Amino acid sequence: MQAILKGLVGAAVGLAVSNASAATIENVRKNGVLTCGTNSATAGFSLPDNEGKWTGFVVDYCRAVAAAVLGDAQKVRFIPLTPKDRFTALQSGEIDILAHNATWTSSRDTSLGILFAGTYFYDGQGFMVRKAENIGSAKDLDGASICVTQGTTTELNLADYFRSHSMTFSTVGFADEEAVVKAYDEGRCDVLSADTSTLNASRQRMAKADDSVVLPELISKEPLGPAVRQGDDHWLNVAKWTLLVMVAAEELGVTSKNVDEMKASDNPNIRRLLGAEGSLGKDLGLGDSWSVDVIKQVGNYGEVFDRNIGKASPLKMERGLNALWSEGGLQYAPPIR
Amino acid sequence: MSGQSLHPPLVSAPLLPPMAPPSGIRPSPATWIRKNLFSTPFSGVLTICFAILAAWLLHQLVSFAVLDAVWAGGQEECRANPDGACWPFIVEKFDYLRYGAYPVSERWRVDLTMAIGAVLIVWLLWKRAPRRNVAALLFFVAYPAVAFVLLRGVASLDLPVIDTVLWGGLLITLLMSIVGIVFSLPLGVLLALGRRSELPLVKAVCVTFIEVVRGVPFITVLFMANFMMPLFVPDYLTPDRLLRPLIAIALFSSAYMAEVVRAGLQAIPKGQYEAAKALGVSYFTMMRLIVLPQALTIVIPGIVSTFIGLFKDTTLVAIVGIADFLRAVETARVDPNWAGPTISSTGYLFAGLVYWIFCFGMSRYSQSMERALARGHKS
């Protein structure tokens, strides 16, 4: 009896493992569509438009992976996920790749059976103040009253920051972000503190949006990146290099507009990036034109940033840490050779 | 002794003229107000306080939703007005709220499905409509097949297949509720009968099912169905990710329905069962013609209450990534193109209104049903 039971359990586990860790890229090719888990609704990052078509920064990353693997950026099935179920959905194989506003941390990388494939957005907790207060830096915030969402790491980060700079502060806490923004807008506190990716969207919802400004300092590290299941190194490489190719394209000045002309460029770096030389496509198990498909159909990193959250979008975020390394930011692609 | 010799007669021969009802039974409005609202100084004070509170709340609501609201224009007009609702936002998002991401060129299929459904439901529920049994047959047998073909699509009929990931908005909410309502009542009746059965195996199965389902939170079941199931079941055996919560909601509500129906069964006097058996009526005929009609009539309020709860519980599917109506409202409100101080309040107000219309409709219909079916149980 016990032997039968053991056999059954073993079979179930074996099935589960084989099911979850079968080569993801084969599954994607077989289905002809990439299943991508995204945020259910975050302004600028992933949001359906009036016709239900998904748009946004992390959405465009999924489209880039689809362009790389399937040659068509439209062949994506988006599954909206909440922060609670996003990792479970990835572990169980319900989605092929997770492109969420998920912070890359050591514990998530090591204990959840998933691996982060890079950082597409360097986020961090920041401050928003009214322009009229004439505050230029977070170091001038001594004695300020700060509106925050309760029960998140936001409060802990604040306490650490103010203690290490020997300043005092008082918090005005609310249960949800909506109430926090409203309180700040009504003048019940001097400062609004949250992750910068949401601060700009929050400002849009205020009655006097133009009166506020985001301070340059970040007091916490929140690198947001795509994640894949552990144990499929090939797929991890595809996820990683799709992002890096977009960054490299920006470094080399290749955009969705000029990619066809650039193929004839003499610059060996550009030739290797676009598959005219070298074997990146073949090594990744993708077609030779995969990087051209990504850049042509989705754009380079800078284009995707500007269109969704940067200057050309309603959110008007600064590049900040997400600028290229050559322009004072952290976005950096290893050499393609 | 015969009746004729009784003197004096106990009953007067001519009828007495009718009298006006005693004062207080059908009072004038002024009397009614005095008796009900100002009977004591304390109740008078309470009446005035609550009247002021009600007037203030009503004023707030009307000025937000009507008087100060933006009725025409776009984002700029809404941003400039922090006091009132922004109805152009709802107008622009209306299609998204109804269909979700269902492809625009195929939305006529959703409209057609809903129109057929509406006609059949009116036919079925309108008490003076002819041939309601035909309507029932169409609604419960033919309609699900038609709806499936129309909504999902069949490639051979020139209707492109629409992935259920794209379904959303009010479509999902109505689909979930109708499937839940249609399946939960018959399943609930069967489970209730099974629980009262004298066959030990049937009874054990029904009791176990009802108690297990009622003992587990719905969210857990949804979560298991949508995220854990692919871990244990191979791809080709995993049902569609919209079908899984549909099955879950049908089974879930049937367990609650079973207990409501059982309450009705227990209210029928034992003599009725015994009389039927004594006449040699078979079990199913007895249930169909004698017990269930009475039992279900008694528990109409409970049944409709379960339906209303089910309608509102469908919003829980949002946590497993299915964009129901409320989720669609939440998604629409974070659109940075429409960001403004009253966008969220407008969205939630509209959502509340839509849910209220459906739930209130169900509640009113059940009340009229009760009145029509009350067979001498009037109190």
Image (cartoon, rainbow, N blue to C red):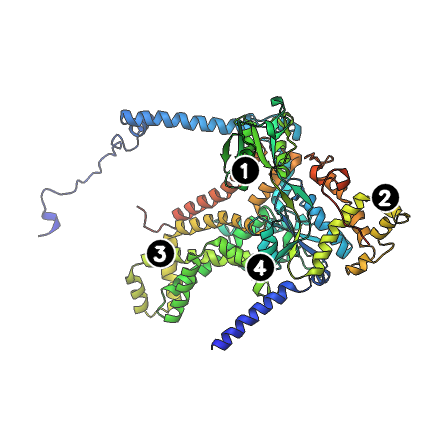
> What secondary structure is marked by label 4?
helix
Q: At x 58% / y 59%, what residue is drawn?
A: B142
Number of on-image labels: 4
| Amino acid type shown at disc 1 | Asp
Query: Are labels 3 and 4 assigned to the same chain?
Result: yes
The residue to which callout 4 is attached is B142
Residue that numbered label 1 is attached to: A160
Observer-nearest of A293 and B139: A293
Where is mark 2, residue-wise?
A258
Residue A137, image x, y percentages:
63, 29
Q: Which is in the foreground here, disc 3 or disc 4? A: 3
Q: Which type of secondary structure does the marked residue at label 1 adopt? A: helix
The residue indicated by pointer 3 is B263
**Residue B358 rendering spot, x and y as whole percentages:** 50, 44
- On what subunit does the disc labeled 2 rest? A
Amino acid carrying label 3: it is: Ala
